[in-house]
Image: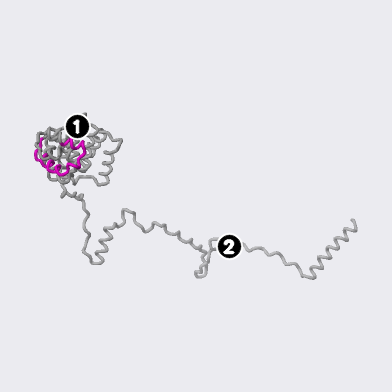
Amino acid sequence: MDPRLVNRHDRRRSRSRSRENRRGPVPPRRESPPPRRWPVPPRREQHGDFSIRRRTPPPPPPPPHWEGRRPRWERPTRRDRLAESSDSRGGRGEPRPRREEPRPRRTDRGDDQASEAPRGQQIAWGKQITARTATTESILALFMREGCRFSARNLATTAHRVGKFGGRRFRSDRRLQPLAEACRRRMDGFNAMELANVAWGFAKTEFIDQRLFWAIAAEAPRRISHFNPQGMANMVWAFATAGVAAETLFGAIAGRAVNRVDDFNPQGMANMVWAFATAGVAAETLFGAIAG
């Protein structure tokens, strides 16, 4: 064996011994404590001269969130809670029973007005009737579906549009008869312009319902102060075209038109003269005001 190696090992041994002499012996390496076990180790209970080894029972699981709550169909309703609160406070007793029958509609405005649709729906129907894409067929189809709920304004607009776009092509249409009956029932809901529009529309279609025209002739003189020149001209033209000589209506319009001759345009003036001449109703004062 090489003496140099021996000497080298000897030197290392001497160094380690000198370190031990200086610092003392190296302490043994500490081991980590054993891990704690779960559940808790069993405990011993002393019973007389012997002990019983009994394990600790695990804790019970938490109750579910729905425990103690009844199903929805078994929970007390608002009516039950009100009854309990009234009983506990010494109230008036049980609450008022629920209304089983539907609430009756208002009938103080008449049966036809009571069955009208809301105002928003009336506006929507009016836009459909007066739309540029509306045709006579679409207007009459809408009336047949929802006419029983139309307002007086929508009925007058329907009659006017059918006369304007349909003309005499629809004089044999069966749908005009229910339209005329609906207008006759709602006569008290029309204003002056709407009365003139209804008469003008049916005269344009040449569908002459005598009961409708005589109802208009009875209603129009009551509102003669609200007629404008165009409404008066359209009204007398419609009656003259329909061949209904309502002298009371013509006389009321003549007396109203005398003071407003300057407000008529040439077409309206010509229609007035033609209508009075065709109906055979004398209106010398009116003709004198027109000629003067």
Report the magenta residues as a range.
245-272
Magenta-span inclusion, residue 258: yes
> Residue at label 2?
36
Which three-letter amino acid code belongs to the residue tagged 1? Thr
Q: Quadrant of residue 111?
A: top left
> Residue at label 1?
205
Q: Is residue 72 above or below residue 170?
A: below
Which three-letter amino acid code belongs to the residue tagged 2? Arg
Q: Earlier in the sequence, mark 2 or mark 1?
A: 2
* Left or right: 2 as drawn, with respect to 229: right
- Coordinates of residue 83 in the picture (x, y in percent): 25, 61
SS type, badge 2: loop
- Coordinates of residue 40 in the picture (x, y in percent): 54, 63
Q: Quadrant of the C terminus?
A: top left
- Coordinates of residue 202 in the picture (x, y in percent): 18, 35
Magenta-span inclusion, residue 23: no
Q: Is residue 191 above or below residue 61?
A: above
